[in-house]
């Protein structure tokens, strides 16, 4: 990711953060503020819708050879994912850091390590 791409994500994350009610976001004038007010379930529902639209656009692009709608839907999915991140006080940089941590690790190994980590966490929680 070059500096301009990172700055675009940072600017967008800042705008999303400013739409939280605690930061003055107004649900009467802002779609993002409205989603924050509606809460996690509304944000998750929107991500589900956007994910489905992304899948359908990819299938259409496979047939037509035109990926423009896929790009549009991916942008929507990323945008709504950024809203969800902000809802939980996470940032795009947190995602980039996690991807960097995984770099060079086999996906199979990383997934197995996550399973072990979650299992250990669940066992520790049960013994408390």
Image: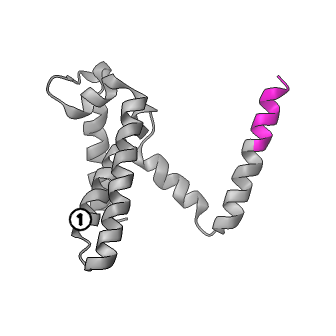
Residue at the far right: name it: 127
Q: Quadrant of residue 52?
A: bottom left
Question: Does the magenta-highlighted stretch encompass residue 120?
Answer: yes
Residue 90, given in percent of the width and then of the height, sits at 45, 38
Bounds of the magenta segment: 119-128
Q: Residue at x 43, y 49 (%)?
A: 93
Residue 49, given in percent of the width and then of the height, sits at 35, 46
Residue 25 drawn above or below residue 94: above
Quadrant for the N terminus, please: bottom left
- Can you see residue 124? yes
Which residue is label 1 attached to? 69
Q: Residue at x 77, y 43 (%)?
A: 119
Q: Residue at x 24, y 60 (%)?
A: 72
What secondary structure is the stretch in magenta mostly built from? helix
Question: Does the magenta-highlighted stretch encompass residue 110?
Answer: no
Residue 23, given in percent of the width and then of the height, sits at 28, 23
Q: Quadrant of residue 128?
A: top right
Q: Secondary structure at mark 1?
A: helix
Q: Is residue 46 left or right of residue 112?
A: left
């Amino acid at each position: 990711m070059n500096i301009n791409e990172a700055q675009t994500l940072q600017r967008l994350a800042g705008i999303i953060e400013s739409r939280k009610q605690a930061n003055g976001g107004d649900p009467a004038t802002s779609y993002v503020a409205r989603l924050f007010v509606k809460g996690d379930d509304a944000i998750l529902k929107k991500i589900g819708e956007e994910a489905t639209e992304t899948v359908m656009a990819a299938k259409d692009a496979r047939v037509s050879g035109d990926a423009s709608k896929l790009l549009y839907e991916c942008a929507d999915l990323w945008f709504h994912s950024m809203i969800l991140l902000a809802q939980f006080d996470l940032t795009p940089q947190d995602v980039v850091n996690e991807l960097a941590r995984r770099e060079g690790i086999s996906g199979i190994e990383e997934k197995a390590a996550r399973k072990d980590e979650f299992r250990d966490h669940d066992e520790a929680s049960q013994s408390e």
